């Protein structure tokens, strides 16, 4: 059953063409360009592997594509409610709400994005949370095979995209929207054979054309399925909610969907997007377990690459 949690606009929507141009990351092409998905949050071991590490290196370069000068977000919680800790979805919804409420502020990591642009102008820190949808129906049969002992279901990228089409089937698409698909504990995914959640990545973003409109989406596995892979170990919103590790990788994909939504805008000469270059790099703490105060609430988020300082930053 699909249940609307927060206000969400209604209109007809059907799945159109497949995903736009992008390709899987590889050691020589980390962010991906060609025919599959866009940038990933690598698992921590991959991020610290010298062959895959995105940190440092040259500044981001503009490649002529679209950016989201303003952005909209929708959270989709997919699967039986037993797969999500109490407080998980509420804390993530709070995060999206806070990011939106803090629009135009310069003291958090989203403000770093305002230095980037496309042919229509610069990115504004202007975010809107359009609500959350819960689809508590059972997952389909596995569409892929992973090697992670902690998972019992493996979802393919095609199944993730089909879920986006299903749950927003009565809504009007907006080209500036990113749909974040959250799956429950023990649910894995692969975008191709051997490239799977918890062994290679913690999340990724890409885009899909729906009813003639290209929108962004992000695959957001339940990070604490394998904490050693995807949990940075700080819980400003309480460890029992299990939401903080997911919020960190959400921030990575959200910001990449803003300044490189179609894979043809901002990335460096190695293929790394802005958040890739600062993956698992958190900078200085403001308190014992947080480095960001957004709309009065505390979060522990990775930094974003700033061309202005040629390095990672937590604010503009």
Image: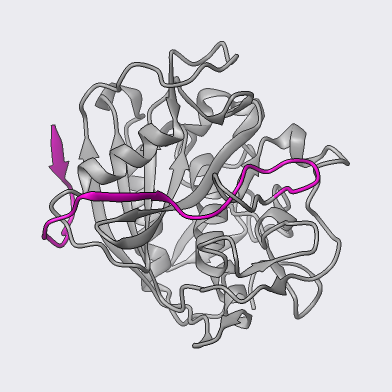
Residue visible at 49% across and 80% down in the picture? 105
Residue visible at 86% across and 62% down in the picture? 57
Which image quarter: residue 153? top left
Which image quarter: residue 307? bottom right
Query: Is 265 in the magenta?
Result: no
Tell which of 65 and 58 is nearer to you: 65
Please provide percent x and percent y for residue 58.
Answer: 84, 67
Q: Is residue 282 visible?
A: no
- Colouring: one colour
Tell which of 150 and 297 is nearer to you: 150
Tell which of 248 and 292 is nearer to you: 248
**Quadrant containing the N terminus in the rendered view:** top left
**Quadrant containing the C terminus in the rendered view:** bottom right
Residue stretch rendered in magenta on the structure: 1-30
Which image quarter: residue 210? bottom left
Using residue 193 as the reference point, say whether residue 213 is left or right of it.
Answer: left
Query: Is 24 in the magenta?
Result: yes
Relative height, residue 279 to residue 80 (above, below): below
Relative height, residue 313 to residue 49 (above, below): below
Please provide percent x and percent y for residue 224.
Answer: 52, 28
Relative height, residue 113 to residue 264 (above, below): below
Q: Is residue 168 visible?
A: yes
Q: Is the magenta stretch mostly helix, strand or loop?
A: loop
Please provide percent x and percent y for residue 154.
Answer: 45, 21
Residue visible at 80% across and 46% down in the picture? 28
Tell which of 34 and 58 is nearer to you: 34
């Amino acid at each position: 059953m699909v249940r609307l949690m927060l206000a969400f606009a209604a209109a007809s929507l059907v799945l159109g063409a497949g995903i736009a141009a992008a390709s899987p990351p590889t050691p020589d092409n980390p962010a991906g360009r060609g025919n599959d998905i866009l940038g990933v949050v690598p698992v921590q071991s991959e991020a610290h592997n010298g062959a895959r590490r995105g940190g440092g290196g040259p500044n981001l370069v503009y490649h002529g594509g679209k950016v989201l000068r303003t952005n909209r977000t929708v959270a989709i919680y997919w699967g039986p409610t037993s797969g999500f800790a109490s407080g998980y979805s509420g804390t993530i919804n709070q995060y999206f709400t806070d990011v939106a409420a803090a629009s135009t502020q310069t003291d958090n990591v989203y403000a770093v994005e305002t230095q980037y642009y496309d042919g229509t102008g610069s990115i504004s820190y202007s975010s809107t949370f359009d609500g959350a949808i819960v689809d508590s129906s059972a997952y389909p049969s596995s569409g892929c095979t992973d090697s992670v002992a902690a998972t019992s279901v493996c979802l393919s990228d095609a199944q993730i995209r089909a879920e986006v089409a299903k749950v927003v089937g009565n809504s009007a698409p907006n080209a500036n929207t990113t749909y974040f698909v959250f799956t429950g504990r023990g649910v894995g995914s692969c975008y191709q054979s051997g490239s799977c959640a918890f062994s290679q990545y913690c999340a990724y973003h890409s885009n899909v054309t729906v009813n003639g409109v290209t929108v962004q989406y992000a695959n957001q596995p339940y990070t604490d399925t394998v904490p050693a892979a995807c949990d940075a170990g700080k819980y400003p919103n309480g460890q029992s909610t299990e939401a903080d590790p997911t919020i960190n990788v959400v921030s990575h994909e959200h910001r990449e969907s803003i300044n490189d939504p179609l894979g043809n805008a901002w990335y460096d000469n190695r293929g790394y997007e802005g958040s890739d270059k600062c993956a698992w790099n958190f900078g200085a703490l403001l308190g014992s377990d947080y480095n960001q105060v957004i709309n009065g609430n505390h979060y522990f988020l990775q930094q974003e690459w700033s061309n202005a300082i040629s390095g990672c930053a937590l604010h503009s």
